[in-house]
Amino acid sequence: MAKMTPDELVEQLRAAYGADLRSVVLYGSAAVGEHIPKRSDYNVLVIVDSLSVEQLRAAAAVARAWGDAGNPAPMTLTLNEWRGSADIFAMEYADILERHKILYGESPFDGIRVDPGDLRLQVEHEAMGKLLKLRQGVLAAGGDQKRLVELLAASLSTIMVIFRAVIRLHGGVPAKDNLAVSQALAAYTRVDAAPFERVVRHVRGDQAITPADAGAVMAGYLGGMEALVAHLDRFGR
């Protein structure tokens, strides 16, 4: 069975939500040419006028088919929720504002602004949270080096969102390319870019991380995240 495409998703969302559907927005790697077939998924933002339980039920089959194609369920908000949430999702909003493609409807970005103070607080929280999850993953993997490779690859997307947010905090504009993002992050924070570049190349299929290499790469990865958390704790003080 053919997998649902973004265009097919739009058509089915229009049928599910009718006149309440305001916007469908593709965001993340697929919107800026960083999508990697069989590895990356499609992230979609859906804005509606209202969102009842009945409407969610109508959209459930659409979301299921979209998920069967390997994608997360659409992030769905009402227009009022979207306009009022930039303070609590500052990091996500900042990333979506720079990395998006409108698939349907009007632009939901007019008047949306991310406050640097909100961004700093969330980035510090997310960086520390990611560090803790990585440590938990290492503990769960035990001595299984293959699981470490999988953990590194699975973590990259979120870490790049964090890195781009840190670059914005320093007044920079993040590049589209993840290698360039890692290098810019290092220039601003003095965090060693090498382990992150290694994971970028692995995810792209350019240079695989073998189980024999996984422990050393993970050590550098954790060290980099620890240094970033310390940098963010000092930032702006």
Image: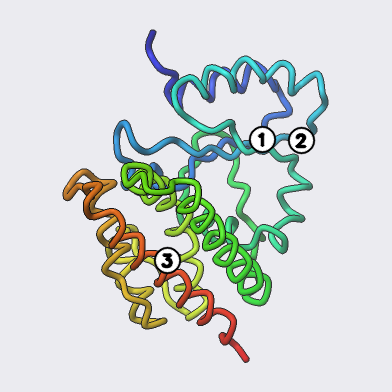
Q: Which mark is residue 22?
A: 1
Q: Is residue 200 left or right of residue 206?
A: right
- Asked if 107 appears above or below 16 in the picture, the reply is below
Q: Which residue is mark 2?
A: 49
Residues at circles 2 and 1 in contact by the CB criterion of under 8 Å = yes
Q: Residue furthest front?
A: 143
First-in-chain label (2 vs 1): 1
Cα separation, mark 2 vs mark 1, equals 7 Å
Q: Which mark is residue 222?
A: 3
The image quadrant that residue 219 belongs to is bottom left
Q: Residues within 10 Å of mark 2 (few under 14, many from 20)?
A: some
Q: Is residue 154 left or right of residue 133?
A: left
- Amino acid carrying label 2: it is Asp
- Amino acid carrying label 1: it is Arg
Identify the element where label 3 is drawn: helix
Q: Quadrant of the C terminus?
A: bottom right
Q: How is the image coloured?
A: rainbow
Q: Residue furthest bottom?
A: 237
First-in-chain label (3 vs 2): 2
Q: Residue furthest left?
A: 206
Q: Residues within 10 Å of mark 3 (few under 14, many from 20)?
A: some
Q: Pinpoint residue 218: horizontal percent, then vertical percent.
A: 35, 60
First-in-chain label (1 vs 3): 1
Q: Quadrant of the N terminus?
A: top left
Mark 3 or 2, closer to the camera: 3
Nearer to the camera, 147 or 173: 147
Q: Is residue 127 left or right of residue 211?
A: right
Nearer to the camera, 115 or 152: 152
Image point 71% across, 40% down: which residue? 77
